[in-house]
Amino acid sequence: MAEARSRLLTDAAATPSPAVAIPREATAAALLAALAAVLPFLLGWLSVAPNRLVSPRPVALPMAAAALPLGLFLLCCLGVALLARRRALLPWAEAVAGLALLALLATLGLGAGAALEGASRLARVAPGAGVWFSALALLLAGGCCAAGRGRMADATPTRFLAVALPGLALLVASGLLDPLSLLKEAAQRGPELRLALLRHAVLAAGALTLAAAVAVPLSLLALRRPRLEAALMTLANGLQVVPSIALFGLLMAPLAGLAAMWPPLRAAGIGGIGAAPAVIGIAAYLLLPLAAGMLAGLRQAPPELIDAARGQGMNERAILRHLRVPLGLGAMLGGLRVAAVQAVGLATLAALVGAGGLGAIVFQGIGQLAADLILLGVLPVVALSLCVDALLAAAQRLLMPPGTRA
Amino acid sequence: MIRFDAVTKRYGPRAAVDAVSLEVRARRICVLLGESGSGKSTLMRMVNRLVEPDSGRIMLDGRDIAGVPPEALRHGIGYVIQSVGLFPHWRVAQNVATVPRLLGWEDARVAARVDALLDLVGLPPDRFRDRLPHELSGGQAQRVGLARALAADPPVLLMDEPFSALDPGIRRELQGALRDIHAGTDKTILFVTHDVEEALLLADELAVMQDGRLIAHGRPGEVLARDAGPAVRHLFGEQTLAFHRLGTLPAAGAARPGEAAAAPLLPEGATLKQALMLMLEHGTDQLAMPGGGALHLSDILAAA
Amino acid sequence: MRLSRRAAGVLAQALAFLLALWAAPHLGWLWGGLFPEVQRPVWDQRNWFALLGSHLLLSLGAAAVAAVLGLAGGILATRQSGRRLRPLLDALFSLAQAVPPIAVIALALPALGFGAAPTLLALVLYACLPVLRGAVAGLDGVPPGVLDAARGIGMGPWRGLTQIEMPLALPVVLSSLRLAVVLSIATAAVGAMAGAECLGTPIVVGLANNNGAYVLQGGLFTAWLALLADRALALLLPARR
C-alpha cells in the first residue's frame, strides 16, 4: 500500500517542466488520484455502530474480503495519474476516475459485508470519512481531466458521470452495497424515496418552464429597449437577495388569498401550501441566470457582424434567426444550465412549504439528526444536479455551431 | 448614379455630415477620403439607409431612397466593411450566397453564381467553397467579402475601408484585384478610405471630407492642383502634395517630340511620378517615350 | 464631493434600517394588519439587534475568510508556477455550482453538529467562489504588455504583483468581494435551519409555526441588509463612466 502511495506521490512531484507535451492537468489529476488512493487508509474505510443509538466507531477494512476490488481501485487511481500525462488520453483518465469510484464502492460494500459478519442484526455500518473524501477527490480528478478537454474553462466531468452513474446503479442492483446502513434505510423507504425524487424533478422542471416562459420573451423585447432591460435586470438581481426560505413562505399568504377569492384556482391545485408557492418561488430565482444568459447570447454576434448583415439586407427577424440565435446558443444554454442546476438545488427547500420532494427527506433527517436520512435526501439531489449539469454541458458542446468554438 | 442633395446628419450638437452635396457618376470609383471622424463613413452608410439623414435627399439611379424599403434597397447594393463581417458559422459558399438566398434564387443558380464569383475574386472554388471563415487568411476573407457583395450583381458597391486592416503587400494585391474587377463589371463604387496612396490608386473621382463637410471634389488631378486649399494640403502632406500630383498626371501629356537615344524606355500609360522614379533610379534626366518622343526632367518640373 | 454625497446617502439608509429594526417590535398594528389570522404577529423571542449582530458576524466572518482564501488562491493560480492548479480550480467551480448550499449544510450537520459551524462552512465555500473567480479574471486581465514592461524596467515578481497587477485587477476583485458579501448575507438565512442564530431565525420559526408575520419580518430585514451592504460596498468601487 505504502508503495503504491509513494509511487503516486513521486509521480506527481516528478512531472517535468512543460517542454514535453504533458498537459497542465496532469499535476492536479495525479495529486487528486494519489489523495483518493491514500485518504481511505488515513481517515478510515468503515465506521460501525453496534446499534442505531450508539455513535459509530471507525474500524479497519477486512482486506481479505475485499482484496480484488481494492486492487482494482488502486490500479485505477494509478491509471488516472498515468493517463492524464497525455493530452489525447485525458478523456480516458476521466473515465478511469469513474471506474475508480465504482471500485472504491465495491471495496466498501464487500468490506462492510465482512465487517458485519458475526455482529448483531442491529449493527450498522457506514462509509468512513476517508471514503467520502476519496470519492470527492475522484470526482474532482474527473473534473480536472475534463478541464483539459474543454476550451471554455468548463470542467464538468461528463464522461466520469457517464461511467459512474450507470455503474452505481448496477452496484446497487447487484446487492453488493446492501450491507451499508444507507442502503438499508433506502430499502425501507423505497417507494417514498422514488416518489420524492419524481416530485423533486417535477418541481424543478415546472419552475424552469415557468421562468423560461417569462424570461425568454422579456429578454427578446429588452434586447433593443434599454429601459426594459434595466428594469428586468434590477428585478432579477433584487430577487436574488431575498432569502429563498422567506420568499417561499411569503408567497403562501397571497396565494392562499387568491385561491380563496377565486375557487377555480384551488380546483387547479393552486393554493397557499404545496407546489404553487414553491414553483413560483424557485422560478423567481431563475430569472437572473435565464435573462442574463439570453441577453448575453443575443449579443454574442459582434456589432460589425450585425452591421454586415443589415448591409446585406437582412431584416431583424432574419438576423435573429441566422446570426443571434446560432452564435449565442452557447451562452443561452449556459444560462439555462445554471438555472436548471439552481432549480434542482432550490427545490430542496420546497419541502418547507409542504411541496414535498427530496427536501422532505433531508429535513426529516435534520430533525432527527440522522446522518443516513440526510444523506438519503442529499445524495440524490447532488446526483440529479450533476446529471443535469453534465447533460446540458454536453448539449452546449454539441450545439455550438462550427467556427464559433475557437 | 448616386446623388447627395444637401445631406445632413447630426449626433447631438455635432454635425457628422454637414450639408453635403455630391454626385457619383455611373461606372466610376468614387473615393471618399478623410481622416477618422470626418464623416465619410456616415455619408456612405446613408446610401443603404444604415444611417438615416436628418435632412437632405439621396437619389439612387434617379429614385429617392427614402421611399425604398431598407431591406429591398440593400439587396441591390453590395456592402463591404473593414472587419469583413463574414458569418463565422457559415461556410464560404453560404456566406457568398447570403443575398441570393434572401432573394429566393434556386439552388442550382446560387451554386453556379457562387463558383463564378469565387473565380472572379481569385479563390479557386474547389479549395475555398467549403471552408469556414476562421480557416481563411485576412486577404482571402476580404476576397470572400467582395464576392458576397457582388453576389446578386448589384449595380452599386459600398466599400468602407475594406483593405485598411490588411498587410501592405496583400493590400496592394486586393487593390489591383478591385481595379480589375471594376474594369470587368462596370460597377459604380463608393469607396471610403483614410489612406492617401490607396485613394489615388483607385479613384476615378476623389471627394475629400473634413469635419462633416465636403471640401474638395473632382478628378484626382483637379483636387491636387497647385491652388489646393490648406485642408487638402494638410491631408496629403505639405511636402508631398506635388509628388502625389505627379502620380495623377499621365507622362504622355508632358512629353516633347524628338528622340532620347540610349535613355531608359518608359512603360505604356505611366504617370509622371513613375517617370521621375525611373529617372532617379537610372541617374538620368531623360526618358524615351513608348512610340516615340522624349521626356526631360524640366518637362516634369513644368507639369508639376 | 460626489463620493461624500453617496456616502451620506448610504449612511442615511443604514440609519433607516436600524430605526426599522428598533421599531419592529412596536409595530404590532402593522404586522397584525397584514396577517390578521396570526395570533402573535410581533417577533419577540429574541432581540432584533442580537440577531443582526450574529447574522453580521456569521456572514462577514465567512466573507472575510473567503476573501483571504479566494485571493490567495487567485494569486497562486495566476503565477507561472501555479498554473497547474488551474484545472483543479475549474473542477472545484463546476462541482460547487452543481451542489446547492443547503446540501453542504445538511451534509456537514452530522459531522459538525447543530449551530453556526455547518453554516459557516457552507458560506465560506460559496463566498470563496466569486472571489477566486474575480481574482483570477482580474489578474488574467492585466495586459501582458504591461507585465512585460514591468519586468523590463527591473521589477521583481513581488513588486510587479503589488504595484502593477493588484492595482490593475482591483476593480474586478473588489466587485467580486462585493458579490461575495451580498450573497453570504442573503444565504446566511438558510443557516437558521441548521440552528445558526441569525435574521433567518424568525423565518424558520415562522415557517414551523405557520406564522407569516415572522417570515415577513425575517425576510424583509435580511433582504434589506443585503441591499444595504451592496450599496455600501459600491462606495469602494470606482464610479463608472
Image (cartoon, coloured by chain):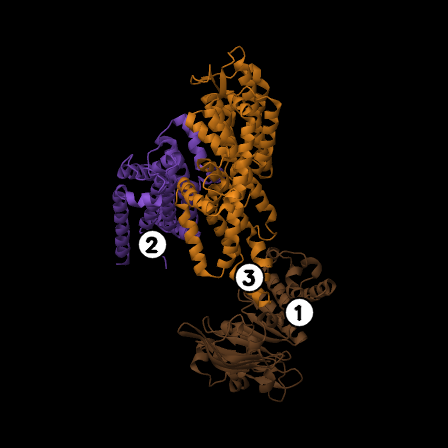
CB-based contact (under 8 Å), mark 1 and mark 2: no
Q: Residue at x 60, y 70 (%)?
A: B74
Helix, strand or loop for disc 1: loop
CA distance for labels 3 and 1: 19 Å
Amino acid type assigned to the residue bearing label 2 in the image: Pro
User: Dot 3 falls on which chain?
Assistant: A
Chain letter for the purple part: C
Residue that appears at 50% across and 11% down: A120
Q: CA distance from mark 1 to mark 2?
A: 51 Å
Rendering coords of residue A129 (x, y %)? 46, 24
- The answer to which of A10 and A319 lies nearer the viewer is A319
Assess whether mark 1 and mark 3 are in contact (beta carbons under 8 angstroms): no
Residue farthest to the bottom, as pictured: B257
Q: Amino acid at mark 3?
A: Leu
Q: What is the three-letter code of the residue carrying label 1?
A: Ala
How busy is the neighbourhood of tag 1: few (under 14 within 10 Å), some, or many (20 plus)? many
**B252 or A351, which is in the foreground?**
A351
Q: Residue furthest top?
A: A118
Residue B302 position within the rendered picture, expressed as x and y whole percent measured from the top left: 52, 87
From the image, state the color of chain B: brown
- Label disc, if present, on residue C134 of the rendered structure: none
Which residue position is annotated with label 3? A305
The answer to whether residue C125 is above or below residue A78 is: below
Chain A as rendered: colour: orange
Asked if residue A136 shows in the view, the reply is no
Left or right: B241 in relation to C20: right
User: Which residue is the site of mark 2?
Assistant: C238
Of helix, strand and loop, which one carries label 2?
A: loop
Q: Is residue A241 above or below residue B79?
A: above
Label 3 element class:
helix
To which residue does mark 1 refer?
B152
